[in-house]
Image: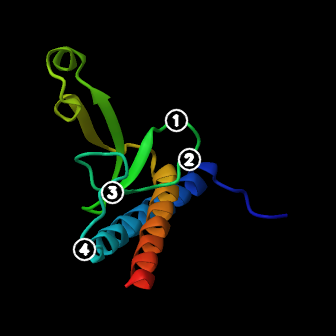
Amino acid sequence: MPDALDPMQERAVADAVVTRAAQQLREQMKRVAAAIVPFPAFPGAVFAYGIEVEPIGTEQGCVIFGDDGTLYELQIGMDASQAALDSDQVGTRHEELVPLDVPAAEFVTYAHRAIAAATAYLERRSAEA
């Protein structure tokens, strides 16, 4: 008969593994971002630079890999009060990069997808050169 399993200990080990993986991926994301010079403007955005990351489910909006190696949710909107006064749509546009705040296990998936997207971008750019 197998030894009794301590569920709390097993959970703690699993959490530690995910935390360690998340930290290693953060470091790798910074290295990959530093290799992308110049960093591409995000399609459809006026002020944001980044590479789109394939979403996980529908809870997050548009997630991008930023030029600093960090994951962000890109939030785009218009200042309605300013738009009524000004016909310049660029001047009334509001773009904000909000740091992605997700649990470590979800971050690991996003980070992996970000690195895959960024390295694919580098491969495409290299092939075009």
The residue indicated by pointer 3 is: 50
Q: CA distance from mark 2 to mark 4?
A: 27 Å
Q: Are marks 1 and 2 in contact (CB under 8 Å)?
A: yes
In the depicted structure, whether residue 19 falls above or below residue 45: below
Q: Secondary structure at mark 3?
A: strand
Residue 32: horizontal and vertical position, in percent? 34, 73
Which mark is in front, 1 or 3? 3
Q: Residues within 10 Å of mark 4 (few under 14, many from 20)?
A: few
Left or right: residue 88 compared with residue 70: left
Q: Residues within 10 Å of mark 1 (few under 14, many from 20)?
A: few
Q: Residue 72: horizontal and vertical position, in percent?
A: 34, 48
Tell me where residue 85 appears, x and y as whole percent. Answer: 14, 16
Measured in 3D between alpha carbons, the distance from the residue under mark 3 to the one under mark 2, in whole angstroms, is 18 Å
In percent of width and height, residue 105 lies at: 51, 53
Mark found first going from the N terminus, 2 or 4? 4
Number of numbered discs overlaid on the protein picture? 4
Residue type indicated by callout 1? Glu
Count neighbours of disc 2 (C-alpha within 10 A) and say few if under 14, some if 14 to 19, many if 20 or more. Answer: few
Q: Earlier in the sequence, mark 1 or mark 3?
A: 3
Q: Earlier in the sequence, mark 3 or mark 2?
A: 3
The earlier-in-sequence mark between 4 and 1 is 4
Contact, mark 3 vs mark 4 (Cβ under 8 Å): no
In front of the other: label 2 or label 4?
4
Per the image, label 2 sits on a secondary structure element best described as: loop
Query: What amino acid is at disc 2?
Result: Ile
The residue beneath circle 1 is 59
Q: Which residue is mark 4?
A: 37
- Mark 4, mark 1: which one is toward the viewer? 4
- Quarter of the image where the N terminus is located: bottom right
